[in-house]
Image (cartoon, rainbow, N blue to C red):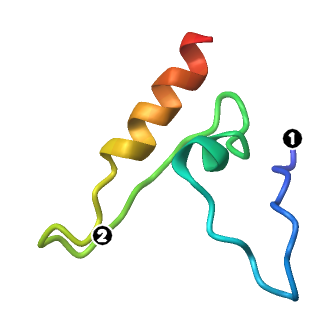
């Protein structure tokens, strides 16, 4: 299954909320969250939104 991409606005991919972003992640996908550390990348909001999506 090919993932659906968010529509571009003036050629740019829009910034999405975590709740909006998880709707583009297909069922049974493997998700990898990478960061440099130092608090730069905080995945809690994304993981919570993913959990909420699958609770519905």
Task: Specify which label sits upstream in the sequence, 2 or 1.
Answer: 1
Q: Is residue 40 left or right of residue 1?
A: left
Q: Of helix, strand and loop, which one carries label 2?
A: loop
Q: Is residue 8 left or right of residue 22?
A: right
Provide the residue designation for mark 2: 35
Q: Is residue 29 left or right of residue 44?
A: right
Q: Please name the residue shown 85% across and 75% down the image.
A: 8
Provide the residue designation for mark 1: 1
In this rendering, is residue 35 above or below 48? Answer: below
Other-residue count near label 2 (Cα within 10 Å), few / some / many at <14 / 14–19 / ≥20: few
Report, in whole angstroms, how far the alpha carbon at label 2 lies from the one at label 1.
Answer: 27 Å
In this rendering, is residue 30 above or below 6? Answer: above
Task: Choose top left, top right, bottom left or bottom right for residue 46.
Answer: top left
Q: Is residue 49 left or right of residue 38?
A: right
Q: Please name the residue shown 86% across and 41% down the image.
A: 1
In the image shown, does 15 or 1 lie closer to the viewer? 15
Task: Choose top left, top right, bottom left or bottom right for residue 35.
Answer: bottom left
């Amino acid at each position: 299954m090919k993932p659906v991409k968010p529509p571009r606005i003036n050629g740019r991919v829009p910034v999405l909320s975590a709740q909006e972003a998880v709707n583009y992640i297909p069922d049974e996908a493997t998700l990898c969250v990478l960061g440099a550390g130092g608090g730069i990348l905080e995945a809690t909001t994304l993981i919570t939104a993913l959990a909420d999506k699958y609770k519905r």
